[in-house]
Image (cartoon, rainbow, N blue to C red):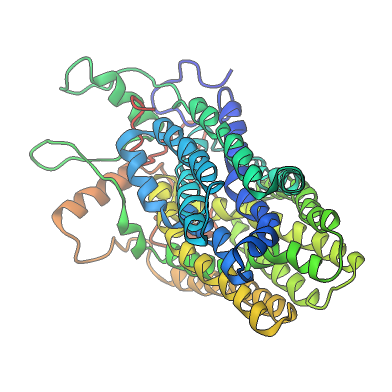
Amino acid sequence: MGAGGPRRGAGPPDGGWGWAVLGACFVITGFAYGFPKAVSVFFRALMRDFGAGYSDTAWVSSIMLAMLYGTGPVSSILVTRFGCRPVMLVGGLLASAGMVLASFATRLLELYLTAGVLTGLGLALNFQPSLIMLGLYFERRRPLANGLAAAGSPVFLSALSPLGQQLLEHFGWRGGFLLLGGLLLHCCACGAVMRPPPGPGPRPRGDSAEDAPGEAEADRAGLRLREAPPGGRTRRRLLDVAVCADRAFGVYAITKFLMALGLFVPAILLVNYAKDAGVPDADAAFLLSIVGFVDIVARPACGALAGLARLRPHVAYLFSLALMANGLTDLSSARARSYGALVAFCVAFGLSYGMVGALQFEVLMAAVGSHRFPSALGLVLLVEAVAVLIGPPSAGRLVDALKNYEIIFYLAGSEVALAGIFMAVATKCCLRRSKDTPPSQGAQGGASDTEDAEAQEDAEALPAGAEEPGSLQALEAPSPGAGPGEPKAEAEPGVDPESV
C-alpha cells in the first residue's frame, strides 16, 4: 500500500492511491492537450457553414488553448482557496457546457465564447490541479509519473481525431459538438478521485483541537503555505509571484514562450494541410492518430529515461535537445506533400513532441522547487497563453494570404529550435556564473518584512541539501529530496485538504 499511517515528515507515498490519481491525471491531460487539436477536424465544416477562412476557424482551438494556459494564475488561486477536488468538478461541468452550447452557435463569435472560452476554462480548472496533486503523491518516481500522465495527450489525440471525423460524417458538426460535450463529463469523475495524501496526525499547536488535524494534514502533504507574522496570526498566500524574480524561472518562461509560438501550429493545421494536398478526409484525420501513436510510446519512455540517476541532473539539456529535434523536424518536412512524406513527418514529429511533453513539467519542478511549483506553473501557463494566441491564428492568416503551407513549417520550426538553443545556452551560461557566485548569497533585496518572513518560511520548508531556487543550478539538479534519514516535505501552497 501507499501511505497508510506515515510518520511525521514522511515524503510522498510514490504509490498507493497515487496510481488512481495518476490515472485521473492521464485522462485530464489527454483532454487538455488532445481536445483542442482534435477539434480541428471540424474546421472545414465550420468554414463552409460560416463562410470563414483558416485564420477565423483556427481561433477556436487557439482560444481554447489560451484559456487553458492563460487562466493558470486563476486556477492556482482557486485551488488555494477551495482545494483541488471542487475546482476540478466545476471545471468538468464548464468544459462540457461549453461544447453543448457551441452546438447551438449561429455565429463565429458564439463559437469563440462557448467552445473557446468556456470549454478552455473548464479544461484549465482540471489540468493544473491534477498536476499539483500528482506532485503530492510522487517524488522518487516523479519523472516516470509525469511521463505516464503526459501520455494521455497522444492517446486521446489518436482516439479523438478519428472519433471527431466519424461524428462529423454521421451527425454533422453540431451533433459532434453535443456528443463531445457529454464526453467531457468524464473530467468530473477524475476530479472525484483527487483526494489528498493521508496525514500523520495533529500538529502540536495552540489551535483548537478540531482544526489541528486538518492543519497537520495540510502541513504534511505540503498543501498549505503559511506566513507567521510576529503577532502569531497565520496568513495563506494565494499566489507566490516572488518566483518571477528567480533566474531559473525566467529562463524557463522565455523558453516556453518561444516554444509555444510554433509547437502547436503543425498539429493544428496538419489535417487541413493534408486535405488540401488531395489526401482523403479519413486518411487526413488518421495523420493525427499516427502522431498520437508515436507520442504514446515516446512520453513514458522519455520519462523513464529522465528518471535515470545519470540523466536526471541534466534534464534541462535533455529538454532543449527535444525542442531542437522538434524544430528541425518541422524545417526538414516543410515540402512534404505526398501521403508517405506526411506519415514520415508525423512519426518524427510525434517522437520529438512526446519528448517535449514528458519533460516540460519535470524541468519546471527541478527549476523552482516543488514548494513553488503551483504558483510557477500558473504564471508560466499565463506566459504561454500569449504565445498560443499569436501562433496558430497568425499561421492561419499566412495560409489565407499566401495559399502556401511551406512558410508555416519554416516559421514554426525556427521558433521551436530557437527555444531549444536558448534553453541550452542560458542554462550553461547561468550555471557557470552561479558557480562563481558564493552560495551564501541571500534572497533578493528590497523585500518587505512580510516577504522576508515568507522567504524564511519557504527556506524552512525546503528539505536539507535542496537547491535554493534563486540559482539556475536548480535547472540541472534533481528535484528536492531527502536522504535515508532526512525528513522531506513538499510545500505546495494553498490546497486545502478539507475542501478537496
User: 8 and 264: which one is in front?
Assistant: 264
Quarter of the image with the N terminus is top right
In this picture, residue 73 sits left or right of residue 30 = left
Q: Position of residue 138 (x, y in %)?
A: 55, 35
Q: Which residue is drawn at 68% across and 84% down?
A: 402
Residue 231's place in the image compared with 172, above or below, is above
Q: Where is residue 393 in the image (x, y as percent from the top left)?
A: 57, 71
User: 98 and 433: which one is in front?
Assistant: 98
Q: Where is residue 457 in the image (x, y as percent from the top left)?
A: 26, 44
Q: Residue at x 88, y 68 (%)?
A: 341
- Identity of the residue furthest to the bottom in this view: 402
User: 60 and 76: which one is in front?
Assistant: 60
Q: Residue at x 33, y 39 (%)?
A: 80
Q: Residue at x 35, y 58 (%)?
A: 243
Residue 330 lies in what quarter of the image? bottom right
- Identity of the residue furthest to the left in this view: 231
In this picture, residue 71 sits left or right of residue 354 = left
User: 486 and 3: which one is in front?
Assistant: 3
Quarter of the image with the C terminus is top left
Residue 82 lies in what quarter of the image? top left
